[in-house]
Amino acid sequence: MRQGLLVACAGFVACVVFLGAVAGGASGRTALFQESFDDAKLEKRRWYDVTRIRIAGRGVAGKGCIEYAWADGNSKGTASSAMRHLFKPTGEVYLRFYLKLSKGWGWSGRNYHPHLTHFLTTENSKWRGPAASHLTLYCEPVNGRLRLAAQDIQNKNAPHGLTQGPLKGGYNGKLYDSREILFKDDRWHCVEAYFKLNTLDSKRDRPRRDGIVRGWFDGKKVIERTDVVLRSTDFPKMKFNQFLLAPYFGPGLLPHAQKLWIDELAVAAKRIGPLRGKGGSRSGERPEGD
């Protein structure tokens, strides 16, 4: 009788742990950090370089979400500011967040902007701007498509030079866009991205074309590249270690006043997937394969 009770109790505990992992998304998995934006106490949760925060009402889950707003076509942005978060250095990094655009959202009409989220590496300081680094990765919506991108402008004078294409007008970059237009309403959508640094052939002093770039929209894979070069042998110790949240339209590129909201953000070394029942995966389902 006693043995039977112990077995039943163990089974109950295991079930509770499993259900907690399913309901929490990142719970029960290894996350480098996660943020629900339920309150404005972000600096207490190791965010830095923060000057303004606006937490809006209920988001996709929890009590709140972070709001970014532009008052007019020439606005530099109101509500929340850019902000950063360091994490344990890793050679592969995964990002998940939920994004909602305001009704009637307008695009820049150019093949760039708005910028939204970024990753930087150990090869730059914790204060480095994203526009000219040894490597900056981007995950953002551009003209309705999901875009993952990379630039390494600061490497123009490095021994092996640029890895993300030649400079054009002072900038360079490799772009990886979804085929379809995905952002076309004012609903919450789950955005995911995964980047893995390419390995290096030290004997031949050259990079291998085995870096990975993947993107998902509401749980569906929409970007897949497994032949990417993100670094050269100039940076054998490079790791990802900084996340930068910085929604931004360049001067003159914002069509009219508008807002966006971000919620349930997670950064990890492996894919976590959408929250169960919150875009892309119904309760109890595992996310689509990596």
Image: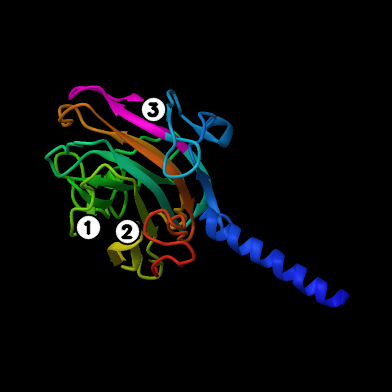
Where on the picture, by quarter, is residue 200? bottom left
Q: Position of residue 208 (x, y in %)?
A: 34, 68
Q: Pointer 1: what residue?
A: 178
Q: CA distance from mark 2 to mark 3?
A: 26 Å
Q: Position of residue 65 (x, y in %)?
A: 43, 36
Q: Pointer 2: what residue?
A: 215
Q: Pointer 3: what residue?
A: 80
Q: Residues within 10 Å of mark 1 (few under 14, many from 20)?
A: many
- Quick one: quadrant of the N terminus? bottom right
Of callouts 2 and 3, the N-terminal one? 3
The residue at 40%/47% (across/down) is 97
Residue 170 sits above or below residue 178 on the image: above
**Is the Cβ of the residue at disc 2 closer than 8 Å to that at disc 1?**
yes
Q: Position of residue 26 (x, y in %)?
A: 53, 54
Viewer-side residue, 95 vs 165: 95
Amino acid under label 1? Ser
**Can residue 133 be spotted in the picture?**
no
Of callouts 2 and 1, the N-terminal one? 1
Q: CA distance from mark 2 to mark 1?
A: 8 Å
- Quick one: quadrant of the C terminus? bottom left
Name the secondary structure under disc 1.
loop
Q: Residues within 10 Å of mark 3 (few under 14, many from 20)?
A: some
The magenta region covers 66-84
122 sits left or right of 216 in the view: right
